[in-house]
Amino acid sequence: MKIRLTSCLALSTLCVTTTARADGWRYTSEVPGLGDISVDPLTIGGRIARNRRYATGTDFAVGKVATVGGAQTSYLGNNVPLAGDFDGDGHDDIAVRWMSGPHEGKWTWSRNDGTGNFLPGKAMRFGGALLAYRGDNTAFVGDFNGDGFDDIGVHWEGGPHVGKWTISTNDKSGNFGAGKTVTIGGKTTAYIGDNEPVVGDFDGDGFDDVGVRNHGGNVDGMWWISRNDQQGNFEPGFAAHFGGSQRAYRGANQLLVEDFNGDGFDDVAVKWTGSGHTGKWTVSINDTHGKWRLAPGRAMTFAGTTPAETAYVGNNLPIAGDFNGDGFADVGVHWTGGHATGKWVFSKNSRRDKVVSTRRVSVHVPVLSSTSRGR
Ligand SMILES: [Ca+2]
Ligand SMILES: [Ca+2]
Ligand SMILES: [Ca+2]
Ligand SMILES: [Ca+2]
């Protein structure tokens, strides 16, 4: 869903603390033709200070209407909006999955033109077919094979496939392979029950992980995450902690998983639709330990909104992604009712505005070719 700085940041820490290196690894400064990379001090500082509140100003800018194929309204009808970087250019694109009507079972995407507007819709194919994943399941987007192109999957909630997780990898041209059932903890079914998928790169290794947050019963509000094993399957689940608690964000809200502070580790946010918080947005920043620990929730703030803590109240579905390609996840909504029906409105993440300089760091890279090995 973004250009991942993860490995650079993780390894930049090694650069300043480690002098001995394993065979086959060198620093960029030691390899002819490779240069150091620029990283902003805020990002480094954010990594070191971890859960420190990252911005003193407004988190997100005033909403801006995006056009799709030049039109201000698009994708009207019963569909689910999804965000992902399907063409691997570092700018998240938008897609919809059609749930009913003449397009039921189809998936359509609009490429981000690089300015935060989107091109006309293009049909997505799955194993060559235009119809995919009809049935009782919930869709998710993530880069599960770490190639920089977002893939698509579903978690089956009912029917003959209940409990299965099926993933179609992106062929790097915006089409997708036939669905493949992945294993979680060695099993082909996992996380059966009243829950919703949670997908993001929680350990910052560049491969999106999967999990669920549970609703109801004695596990209400508990989150479980399974790490991507980097081979196309997932490890047994661990309980996520939010400020030390294993339960978080119970109530009526919509879930968003993205990297809101740009440190390469995905964070968790919700947009509240009830439970006394309607219109508020809350974020828990990933503490970057890779142990499924996130900070307690704090309010996300939007410029130009009164009161400042509420935004995008009404009939819409929220999405999050890096739509301007600056490494910090933005948020937006697709309006599904009222006078704005069909509009896509995005609020840019303002954190990048606080970055005033960058620092050159030498990062640890694998040296794989026989000619450069042992340099
Ligand atoms: Ca893109
Ligand atoms: Ca991929
Ligand atoms: Ca991961
Ligand atoms: Ca983060």
Image (cartoon, rainbow, N blue to C red):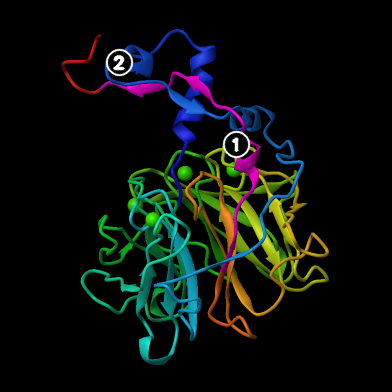
Q: Residues within 10 Å of mark 2 (few under 14, many from 20)?
A: few
Q: Nearer the viewer, mark 1 or mark 2?
A: 2
Image quadrant for the C terminus?
top left
Task: Please give the range of residues in magenta.
Answer: 345-367
- Ligand 4 lies under 8 Å from the Cβ of mark 1: yes
Residue at the extreme front: 70
Q: Nearer the viewer, residue 40 or 194?
A: 40
Q: Residue at x 49, y 11 (%)?
A: 18
Residue 315 disc label: none
Instruction: Reply above or below: 225 against 179.
Output: above
Assign a secondary structure to mark 1: loop
Residue type, mark 2 in image: Val
Q: Residue at x 42, y 68 (%)?
A: 154
Residue type, mark 1 in image: Thr
Point out residue 352 in the picture as x, y percentages from the top left corner: 60, 41
Q: Tell me where residue 249 sits by quadrant.
A: bottom right
Q: Quadrant of ligand 4?
A: top right
Q: Is residue 211 visible?
A: yes
Determine which residue is flagged by label 1. 288
Instruction: Reply above or below: 68 against 283.
Output: below
Point out residue 231 in the picture as x, y percentages from the top left corner: 33, 45
Q: Tell me where residue 20 sits by quadrant.
A: top left
Q: Is 120 displayed left or right of 267 in the figure? A: left
